[in-house]
Structures are given as C-alpha cells and as structure tokens.
Image (spheres, rainbow, N blue to C red):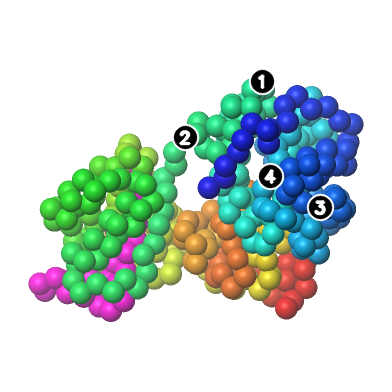
Amino acid sequence: MLKLAREQILLGQSVATKSDAIALLAGKLTEAGLVEAGYVDGMLAREAQHTTYLGSGIAIPHGTTDTRHLVKNTGVMVAQFPNGIEWDEGQIAYVAIGIAAKSDEHLGILRQLTHVLGDEQAAAQLKEATDADTIINILTGATAAKEVQYLTLADFPADDRDQLLLGAAARAKSAGWGDAAMVSALLASEPAYLGEAVWLARAQAAQTGWVLATPSSPLMTGDLPVSAMLLLCAADSSHLPQLENLAKLAAAGQLATLAGGEGLAMLQAGPASGLSETFTIINPHGLHARPGAMLVKVAKEFESDIRVANLDGSGEAVSAKSLMKVIGLGVKCGHRLAFRAEGADAEAALKGIGEAIAAGLGEGAH
C-alpha cells in the first residue's frame, strides 16, 4: 500500500522542461535519503529510452535497472505543476511522481498509482489541488470510487464444498471486503448450483468483489460435482454486469471455463469470442514502463479488440492498448499473460504480440 506524507508532496511547482522536472524530483529523492546523487542520470536515461508519460496529465519518471544500486530505500516524491509541462510532443503533465525502487517493488507502486490515476476526474483534481492532503487522498485511493475487485484461490485443499466456500470467504475477509459476520453468514447460507460443476455464493460486504476458488482435487456434494466456487461480495449494484455474463456463459454452455486459468477474465467478458493465446513474460524485472509500453505499442498496431489478463495475478482482463491498465496488472518475470483478440486481424495480432514477448519487448530475449 502506497503511503505518503505531506513532505513528499511538492505543490505549485514551475519548471521549463521535463528534464528540469526530473532533476527537481531526483534532488528531493536524494534529500530524503532514498537515493544517491547519481540516480538522476538513471531517470534521464529511462526517459531517453521511452517516455514515462502515462496519460491523463500524469508522468512517472524513474531510474533504469542499471541504477538500482543507487536506491537506498523504495519511495516516491510527487510534484504538481499547475501550468503543465510538455512531457512529450502533445502530452502535457500536471503531476509527476518520481519513483525510487530497489527491485520489483515499483510494480506494486505502479499498480496502485495507475489504478487511481486512470480516473480522468482524479487527474483533474490533482492538477487543481491546493493542499498536500488532497493529493495524498487521491493518490492513496481515499477519495477514489471503489471498483469491482477480483481475487483467486486456486487449487485449495478442500475436502468438500463448504470448505471451499470457507476458503473463499477467508480470502475475501483478508482483503478487507468484509468481517467475521460476513463469513458466518456465508457458512450459514446454501450456495446455488449454476451447472457444469460451478457454484455461486453471495454475501453483503463493504467492498464489491468476486472470489473464484477452485479445489485441488474434484469434489462432490451429493450427486453434484464441484470444480469452482464463485463468491460474490456485494456492496452496491456494480456486480450486475458480471451476473449478466454468468447468465450468458450458462446459456452458451461455457460455465466450465470458469474453472480454468482464464476464469475471471470469462466472468468479466462473458462467453468466449475471438482467438486466445497465453504467453509467459521473460523480462527479468517484469512489465515496468519500457516493456509495458512496447507491448501496448504492438497491440495498437492492430484493429482488433485485445484484452489481457495476468493469470498469476488478479486474473482481471484489461485492454492491452492501455499502458496504465497493462502496468497495473503487476506482471513479474515468469507470469503468464492470457490474451484474447476479436476482430479481422485477431490472428495476426496474437502472432505479433507473441513474437514481441519472445523477443523481450525491447529489452532483448533472455
């Protein structure tokens, strides 16, 4: 979880160029004892490799892997530029977040930041903020609208359906979606059998989200099989699109796909359409800004709608053409990415993406 203090927020800054902005942030990171003086060279080198502008008026300058040895502690500094800086041609940044990361810790920071900063309204609020607390609240998600969350509990060692449900409930509770009373209510309820060995349980909660739990070995409840338990935690009505997709999956006879690696992606997208492929990321430091941008660039070369889910992460499917969404997947080396493309050039799109990933997404194959 990103934690910010007022002294990390630089309000109302004014500089001429993005290089000046990076130098300002690097200086503050150095003053804070997070990095050594030479880290600024890594930040400028990273920018030369590929712009760190994310969109929505937000840039996230950070160092290269070659300068990680200059990082003493992982942390960030945030500078607000109300008049804007031309970060790249036609791209104006109003907030720049300088990141110092010792290893892959920055992926967690990026995941949280991109989740918040994908909101255009939040970006406008960051530009216009006149106090540090407002910026802190926006960046840490205190003022952000809660979106539907997704969690997986794969290969859970359950002896029966109720133990599988208990595991899913505990997973939701540990994520802060509900309390012990929610777990008790779930255990006292009777899950609904949807068909194709898939079950659904539901509870009122503080956060709307879905947990997909699968057992380590096939289970039976009476004469009915159990291959997947879906737990719906509902705080509002934002779960209705997923319920509609469940109905569509049932009508198409595709409920059984929920027990596979793309289960949550199916829950979000509905019945399978288009073509799909799964590729493994080989980049030693995962999908940070540079390889992430390369992946998005390749995806944008095709007209097809392309969605991607991190099978070793939340399983949430996002647009492969959005840098913020791709980085927000928190992809590390060895993670499997499931792509689904729908359109006239879907086959070519998946082939191009696969080749780019195999080539190291601009960092060379390893």
N-terminal of the two: label 3 or label 1?
3
Closer to the camera in the image, 69 or 55 = 69
Q: CA distance from mark 1 to mark 2?
A: 21 Å
As drawn, is 64 to the left or to the right of 78?
right
N-terminal of the two: label 4 or label 2?
4
Q: Residue at x 27, y 46 (%)?
A: 179
Closer to the camera in the image, 169 or 11 = 11
Magenta-drawn stretch, dominant element (helix, strand or loop): strand
* Res. 76 mark: 4
Nearest-to-viewer mark from 3 and 1: 3
The amino acid beneath tag 4 is Val
Q: Secondary structure at mark 1?
A: loop
Residue beneath label 3, please? Answer: 36
Q: Residue at x 18, y 61 (%)?
A: 193
The amino acid beneath tag 2 is Ala
Residue 126: x %, y % from top left: 65, 29
| In the depicted structure, whether residue 43 falls above or below residue 351 | above
In the image, the segment drawn in magenta is: 208-230
Q: Secondary structure at mark 2?
A: loop
Look at the numbered discs 3 and 2 and tell me whether their residues touch, using CB distance below 8 Å: no
Quarter residue 337 falls in: bottom right
Magenta run includes residue 229: yes
The amino acid beneath tag 1 is Thr
N-terminal of the two: label 3 or label 4?
3
Nearest-to-viewer mark from 1 and 2: 1
The amino acid beneath tag 3 is Glu
| Crowd tier of the residue under label 4, counting other residues whose Cα lies within 10 Å: few below 14, some 14–19, many 20 or above | many
Q: Secondary structure at mark 3?
A: loop
Q: Is residue 277 visible?
A: no
Residue beneath label 1, please? Answer: 130
Nearest-to-viewer mark from 3 and 2: 3
